[in-house]
Structure formats: C-alpha cells, structure tokens
Image (cartoon, grey):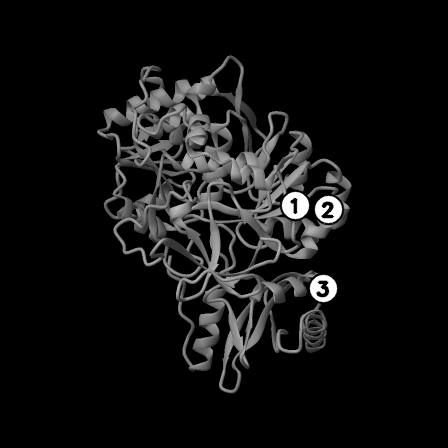
Amino acid sequence: MRDYQSAVGAFDLQRAVAAALSGSLEAVNACVECCDRHALPGRIALFWEGRDGTRSTWTFSQLQDASARLANYLRQQGVRPGDTVAGLLPRTPELLITILGTWRLGAVYQPLFTAFGPKAIEYRLAASAARLVVTDAGNRAKLDEVPDAPPILTVSGPKGQGIRRGDGSFWAELEAQDASFAPVPRRGDDPFLLMFTSGTTGPSKPLQVPLKAIVAFTGYMRQAIDLRPEDAFWNLADPGWAYGLYYAVTGPLALGYPTTFYDGPFSVESTCRIVRQYGITNLAGSPTAFRLLMAAREEVEAQLRGRLRAVSSAGEPLTPEVIRWFAERLQAPIHDHYGQTEMGMVLCNHHGLEHPVHLGAAGYSVPGHRVVVVDEQLRELPPGQPGILAVDRRQSPLFWFPGYLGQPTRAFAGRYYLSGDTVELNQDGSISFIGRNDDVITTAGYRVGPFDVESALIEHPAVIEAAVVGKPDPERTEVVKAFVVLHAPYRGDASLAEALRQHVRQRLSAHAYPREVEFVAELPKTPSGKIQRFLLRSQEIARAQGQAPQAAAH
C-alpha cells in the first residue's frame, strides 16, 4: 500500500491526465475513455441482473457497437454535440448504452432518477433543455404529465408494451442504424454530464460536469476505493445520482474494470445474494444501506463474513457502531468518504493509501485537492476549532466545479469553494464532519453537531435510524430533538424515550443529549438516501409558530 504523504507530494496533474484521459485535454471523448479503449475481445464491462432473476454480461466491444448505433440515431433526430439527452431508466444495459451513445456523439447526459414524479422530471427537463428523453415502459407514463416534453425513445416491455404513437422504439431503432460512428472530440472543459444537486437543504440546482472531471473520478477509484484488477466491484448507488453515475459508471469503466448493476430495490436478502453470487470483494454504498445490513446482523454475518476486502461509504457520515460491526463481525474494513455533487469525492479514508484512520473522521484530502477548515472571515483554522469545510481552488488542480448553470454560485469566496458543511480539523490532519451549517444546533450557548448525537443513539439496540435537529426554544435558543426509528420488538413509549436520553447523556455530555425524543416510522430523505433534517427543522419551527409544516421543494 502506498503512503498517503508520498502520494500527495508526488501528485502531478499532467501525469494524472496522461493516465486517465489518453494524455490530452484538447481532444477528449467520454465514450472513448469509458468504452472504446478497453474494447478488447471478451473484456467484460457489465454484470447485470434484473429483479426477475434475468442475467446478462456485456463486453466493452458490445457496448461500443450499441453506443455507435445510438449515436447515429441521436444525430438523425437532430441532437448535436453539446446538446443534452436525458435518461429516465432503471439500472439496465439500456441505461449504459444511452449514457455511452450520448457521450459518443459529444452530447451531455442528464440522469433522471426513476423514483421522481412528473413535477420533479418537468423541473429538470426544463432547466436542461434536453433534446430527447430515453425511458422504459415502466416510467413512460410520467412523461405524459410533463408539458412540452422532448421527443421520447422508449425501451419497450414484452410485445412492444409501453411504446406510444410518436415514440421511437429503442431496440428497433438501434437495429436500423449503422454500427460505426466516429467519436466526436471535445475539450476538457466541455461538459459531458448535467447533474442536479440532491436537495438536502432545498431545491435542486443544476450544474455541468466537465470532461476533465474523469481524471478526479479515476483517482478516487484507485486511491480511495482501491479498485484492483482482481476485484469484483459493486456500487449500490443508483446512477440517477452523482455517487452512482460518477463511481458506479464513469470511474470503473474509465479504468477498464467491469461494474455491476442490480435492477431491483435494496434488500438485505438481495445484497447478500449478489455479493456471494458474483464474488463481490469491493463494495460501495450509502450509510443507510449499511445500517440496514447491521440491523439484520445474524443473517448478514452468516453470509458475508470474510467475503469483502474493502467497503466504502458516502452520502452521510458512518456511525462508529457501523464501522466496528463491519470490522469485527464481517472482517471487512469500511471507510468514510466525503464529497458533493458539485465536486465529487474530496475527503476520504483511503483504502489504497496508508494513513491513520481516525474513527468517525471523514478522512484526508484526496490527492489533487487541498481541503481546509475556514471561519466566516475565510481564515484557515487550526485543529480543534469548528468551521466551514472549504476547497482551496488555487491549490486543487483536480477541483472541477464550474458553478451552477444559469444561477449565481454563492459558494465561491475568493480562492475557496465553501461546501456549506461544518467540520473540524483533527491533530493528525484528518477532518471530522459535524453537520451542515444549517444543521448545527445552538443550545444554551453550546454548538452541538447532530452527527455525534445520532451516532450515540444508533449504538442503542432499540434504534435503527435517528435524525437530530434543533427545536426553537425561548430560553436555550434551541433544544436538541431526536426523531427515532425503532427495531420491531421495541415500543416507542415514555420509558424508552427517557432511556435513550440517558444513554446519549452518558456518552456525550450534559448539554448534548436530546431533551425531546419523537418516535417515527421513517425519516424524510432525498431520493438518494440522505436524511433531510431541514424538513424536520422546518416542521418544528412551524409548530412553534402555530403553522402547518411546509412541503419539501424538489
């Protein structure tokens, strides 16, 4: 394993570009990088399993052929380099063909998460000015409710089910096209993805991801994920969101490694089965998935102990209890990684680089980035002082975020990009996550991070998940309130609420425990699985003011 400090000191952007983008930022095509240059006889790009048990494998050569056919069709429909093509598709081979065919034309791919309703789809299509949407029979009806929807290409169900008059039929159209299409070269600053932020703290914002970001994506796969040729890799994240599209599609394929798609909902049973069936050794996903695995301890331990070499988590901080359970009971190191849609992963406990792993810390700057902690005056803070996580843009050659599309970007302040997250620098150089700026609770003069309280709550055997917010209080400014999801055998009564309060108080402090506990069936989350604490906080503010809680904006 390579030493972290030597990796940082030896980082060279030009060498990174040469390794990741065939040596040039002047003539780049994402389909070439993620498909064509790996299209050797028999080299597998995708292991796919449908929810009905259907399975298939796709080679890079097969995807090269299919992407060329789709690119010819898109050009025939008037799509040009730089235009946007949207995909409203589940995790299927057609999704991967749509992505690669769009890139082959030099166009920009826009993901539409399949759990979105018509309003969320309408908002995103209008903002992107997409020229065409590729969907399937199961999602086609949503587009009927989208005014002025662009032309539609549909992957049909059995016997052509789902094809409407005026739609193109995906496979029929591809079969009618030539299998040759010269990839359109683009510049490194040209976009190849159009993303929307996940809406953790409010309405989603659009941003374009430039081709040069592929350099950062592959660096993360090598150094943080530690993806190796002998690994079988599975990222549980949906490609409708950044972590899935960046690191379940672009990252592994750009390195020439196969990825795994399971077109079915998350469950403990399916996760254990696929890990065993495909020999998965390198697993990535969200804390929500890993908490649900831990909640079914006996079943998971019996099936997965000793099978996973490396496990990576992103989206929210892992709790210490989850980290210990993976290490002790599954014999698998699970590491926290931190990033945003705007910049990818920039702060990690790297599986592929040797450095101390501080329990509960988000990690260290990914080589090619300088991540610091600043105060409101943009002064860099020493260890032990909470502040804003910032990326020093002058000293971060792999930082690629260009700003929001058609909107002001208030996150840029001088040389820094301000993430909006409150963190703290540790003595060993790692950085610990405290919470979103809006999530940090001020109670009786103390600042309390929700993550510490949530971590303590989850250590209690009754608790599956917890979200902690500040509730307005005239005396203390705010009091700490916890929303708790329980395991089935437990009853959410006053006695358990008091037990949870004392449990946290003994582990943290006399001020950082939840004075109120509310038991709920589920927590509000973004479609990508992040807890939306701002909705719970807004609910408490509305209650304090005697108002009805506001619905979430999408």
Residue 220 shows in this picture? yes
Residue 524 placement (x, y as % from top left): 51, 61
Residue 51 shows in this picture? no
Q: Secondary structure at mark 2?
A: helix
Q: Secondary structure at mark 3?
A: loop
Residue 102 placement (x, y as % from top left): 34, 30
Which residue matches tag 2? 327
Q: Which mark sits nearer the N-terminus, 1 or 2?
A: 2
Q: CA distance from mark 2 to mark 3?
A: 19 Å
Q: Nearer the viewer, residue 103 or 91?
A: 103
Q: Nearer the viewer, residue 476 or 488?
A: 476
> The residue under label 1 is which amino acid type?
Ile
Q: Are marks 1 and 3 in contact (CB under 8 Å)?
A: no
> Which labelled disc corresponds to residue 334?
1
| Rendered-image quadrant of the N terminus | top right
Which residue matches tag 3? 460
Residue 216 lies in quadrant: top left
Q: Residue at the location (72% across, 66% down)? A: 490
- Comparing labels 1 and 3, the label whose residue is closer to the camera: 1
Q: Are marks 1 and 2 in contact (CB under 8 Å)?
A: yes
